[in-house]
Image (cartoon, rainbow, N blue to C red):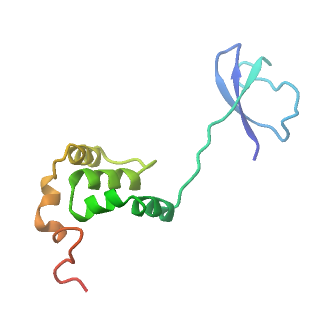
Amino acid sequence: MPIYEYWCRHCQGKVMLYLPTFSQSSPSCPQCGNNTLQRLFSTFSVHKTYKDVYDNILSDSQLVKGMLSNDPKALAEWNKRMSQGEKVAPEYEEMVDKMERGEMPAELASNSLGGSLGEATEGAD
């Protein structure tokens, strides 16, 4: 669906308009009715799949080595890459900030995770 963004020079507002074709001559601003619109180029993003993210992480041998040795900085980097573009809770951000400083948060340092990432958890099938 062709939705175009414009800047209205008259009311100084940004508007989005559905136009069947771009060649439509001078559309009017829906806010003020003026036709002094300047076309803007919209931003876009490319969505990566989880496989793309995992492949990127696994190709970084230093990061993998750090994760296997429970290096808090490597774990923070892994978390940032995995949550890229996602909204995360403030508590999560705080925990990742601690790990970036080289601190292992208490909830991760305890045995509640079943040991290091490189070890199998007790009682796992």
Residue at the farthest top position: 10
Of residues 124 and 4, the one nearer the viewer is 124
Could you tell me residue 98's position as x and y percent?
A: 20, 45
> Measured along the vertical axis of the image, is residue 67 above or below residue 115?
above
Residue 7 lies in quadrant:
top right
The image shows a total of numbered marks equal to 0
Q: Quadrant of the C terminus?
A: bottom left
Could you tell me residue 72's position as x and y percent?
A: 21, 53
Could you tell me residue 11's position as x and y percent?
A: 67, 15
Residue 82 lies in quadrant:
bottom left
**Along the horizontal axis of the image, is 96 left or right of 24?**
left
**Along the horizontal axis of the image, is 121 left or right of 90?**
left
> Measured along the vertical axis of the image, is residue 60 above or below residue 42?
below
**Along the horizontal axis of the image, is 70 left or right of 44?**
left
| Residue drawn at x 28%, y 54% as measured from the top left | 74
| Residue drawn at x 15%, y 67% as measured from the top left | 112
> Measured along the vertical axis of the image, is residue 20 above or below residue 54?
above
Residue at the farthest bottom position: 125
Residue 68 lies in quadrant:
bottom left
| Residue drawn at x 25%, y 50% as measured from the top left | 73
> Measured along the vertical axis of the image, is residue 2 above or below residue 66?
above
Could you tell me residue 17's position as x and y percent?
A: 74, 34
| Residue drawn at x 25%, y 45% as measured from the top left | 100
